[in-house]
Structure formats: C-alpha cells, structure tokens
Image (cartoon, helix red, strand yellow):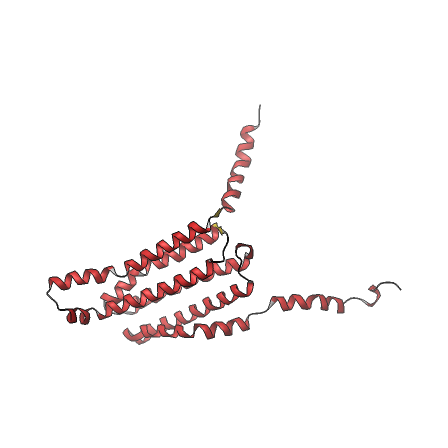
Amino acid sequence: MPRRLDVGSTHYPDAVADRTGTQEYKTERFKAFVDAVVAIAMTLLILPLVESVSEAASEHLTTPEFFDRHAGQMMSFLLSFVLIANFWLGHHRQYDEVTRITRPLLWFNVAWMATIVWLPVPTAMVGQMETDPLQQAVYIGTLVLTQVTTLAARVYLLRHPTLTTASTDRIRHGVAADVAAIVLFSVALAIGVIVGPSGYFALLLLIFTGPIAQLLYRLWPDRRAKDAETPESSEDERPEGSGEPE
C-alpha cells in the first residue's frame, strides 16, 4: 500500500509547527496596528470628561464650577495622556530599527498593548473615585506592567540581534532605562500606598530615570572586554613545549 498517509501524519504536523514557530510579520502593518491601538487608548481617556460636561450642563453648572468640581478628573487625564505618549515615543524609537517581527516579539507587544488599552480604566477611577491603596496599586501597577513588557521585548531583541539594526550598546542602554523605570515606578507605588491621595506625586521620581539608567549601564559587565582578554589569556597559558620547532 502507498505510504502517503503515513508521510502526511508524520511530517505534516512537524512542518506546520516549524512554519508557525518561525513565522514573521511585516513591520509596516505591525507599527500601524500599534499606532492605532495607542491612538484609541489616548482617545478613551477623554470620554469621562465629555460625559462630565453633559452632566454639568444638566445641573446648570457654570464653567468655573465645572473646572473646580472636575479638577482631579482633568489632572488624571493629563497624567495618563502624557504617560501613554511617552510610552508610545519609546516604543517608536525601539521599533524604528526593527526589521523583522517574529511570533514571540509580536506577543510581547500584544501584552504591551493590553496594558495601554487598560490604562483608561484606572485613570477614570483616579479622576472619579476616592483614593485608596488598591486604586493606586491598580493605576501604578499598570504602568509597571507596561514597562515590564517593554523590557521583555527589548531583552528578546538583545538575544536576537539579527531582528534589528540597532547596536548592542543601544539596546543595552534601553534595557538599563527600562529597569530604572520599573524600579522608580515600584518605589512610587510603595510611597503612594503609604502616603495616601498625595502619593501620586511620587511619580515625579521618574525624572531620575536617566541618571539611574546611566549608572546601571556602567555597572553592566562588558562582554566585549572579556572576549578580547580571552585570546591573550589562552596564549599565556600555552605550555612551553607547544611552540613552533626551530
């Protein structure tokens, strides 16, 4: 009997697994999709304020009264708008030099986009509800997760340098900046939970991201220096009798 069935049942699943495991996606469509998701998330931030205007009109509030009553809501909108814009700018710089998108890299970005889309929810909580530790944990914790997914994707690029034209040093600088931001977000979260409503001002600690990132980068072991020392050490350890005959 012909062995066509055996060949198909044996090799076809492996072929499918290999194809899906190495599948790549066009960077242009990927970047356009990310830009659309970020734009939608930034637009969602303003919707609670638009609804508040309708409520104010029904209550016959004046403009000064509206701004006074919804000052916290406007501050939370501005804060989240700036943060998402900053995340997007960092993402744009990171993927401007990426030439290929693999499946793992795509899923890292799906997780990143999930945190961006979720951020309008805790933003509305901050602007419309009384501050409590859980609210702060949800809001700042979302920012931490956004930065963690950014770090995960950057480490992946560091281990797969053929996917990007960026130099190893450039990627390492990005990794150091991501770690610094995660540390500062975590410190801000701890301060916010302890201090209370005014704890959101601890997010101003992010201005120290640059100096801390530089410090972390300087502490990063330089593999190139170790690789350069390897041949010299191997020559020094060569046995005396292993030289070329005269």
Residue 206 at x, y = what percent? 39, 72
**Residue drawn at (45%, 52%), measured in percent from left and top?**
106
Q: Which residue sits at x=29%, y=63%?
A: 122
Which image quadrant is residue 135 in?
bottom left
Figure quadrant of residue 119: bottom left
Q: Position of residue 9 (x, y in %)?
A: 52, 33
Q: Nearer the viewer, residue 154 or 12?
A: 154
| Horizontal arrangement in the rendering, residue 175 relative to residue 83 (left or right) | right
Find residue 171 and report its horizontal and vertical position in percent: 52, 63
Compared across the picture, whether 130 is left or right of 171 comes to left
- 229 or 57, which lies in front? 57
**Image quarter (top left, top right, bottom left or bottom right) of the N terminus:** top right
* Among the 4 quarters of the image, the one containing residue 91: bottom left
Q: Is residue 149 visible?
A: no
Residue ID at (20%, 68%): 70
85 versus 16 height, above or below: below
Q: Residue at x 22, y 63 (%)?
A: 49
Locate residue 194, reporting x and y percent. 33, 75
Q: Which of the two residues, 46 or 143, is positioned nearer the viewer here?
A: 46
Q: Is residue 71 above or below residue 28?
A: below
Residue 4 versus residue 105 in the image, above or below: above
Q: Quadrant of the C terminus?
A: bottom right
Residue pushed farthest right? 246
- Relative placement, left or right, of 193 versus 53 is right
